[in-house]
Image (cartoon, rainbow, N blue to C red):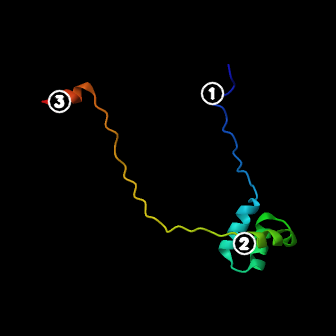
């Protein structure tokens, strides 16, 4: 017979992962218009020297970004209707 009726709860630890190169550069482009500042921001996010990020930011500056207008989305929740045989008979009457 086990010693515990219910097992002890597990300790959950969140994983800390640095952003990928593309994520860091995209975030930096959204925060600043200057390529030098973008390189500094991306380097700080990734934890690498600025000199390693500068050529990649320059390459990413040549990419064109496609933006779409914001769209309002309305979600309507409809209850699922299940009929029991008794309810079906009552509705027929």
Point out the frontmost of discs 2 and 1. 2
Q: Quadrant of residue 27?
A: bottom right
Vertically, is 10 above or below 4? below
Between 61 and 26, the residue placed more toward the observer is 61
Residue found at x 66% / y 38%? 9
Horizontal side of 49 relative to 30 (left or right) equals right
Q: Residues within 10 Å of mark 3 (few under 14, many from 20)?
A: few
Residue found at x 69% / y 45%? 12
Mark 2 secondary-structure assignment: loop
Numbered label tally: 3
Q: Which residue is mark 1?
A: 5
- In three-dimensional space, the C-alpha distance between marks 1 and 3, rounded to whole angstroms, equals 48 Å
Q: Which residue is mark 3?
A: 90
Q: Which label's residue is closer to the chain start, 2 or 3?
A: 2
Q: Which label's residue is closer to the chain start, 1 or 3?
A: 1
Q: Which residue is mark 2?
A: 62
Q: Are marks 2 and 1 in contact (CB under 8 Å)?
A: no
Vertically, is 11 above or below 49? above
């Amino acid at each position: 017979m086990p010693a515990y009726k219910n097992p002890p709860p597990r300790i959950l630890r969140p994983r800390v992962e640095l952003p990928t190169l593309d994520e860091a550069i995209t975030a930096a482009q959204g925060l600043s218009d200057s390529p030098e500042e973008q390189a500094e921001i991306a380097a700080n996010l990734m934890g690498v020297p600025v000199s390693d990020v500068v050529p990649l930011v320059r390459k990413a500056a040549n990419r064109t970004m496609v933006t779409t207008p914001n769209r309002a989305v309305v979600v309507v929740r409809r209850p699922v209707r299940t009929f029991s045989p008794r309810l079906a008979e009552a509705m027929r009457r």
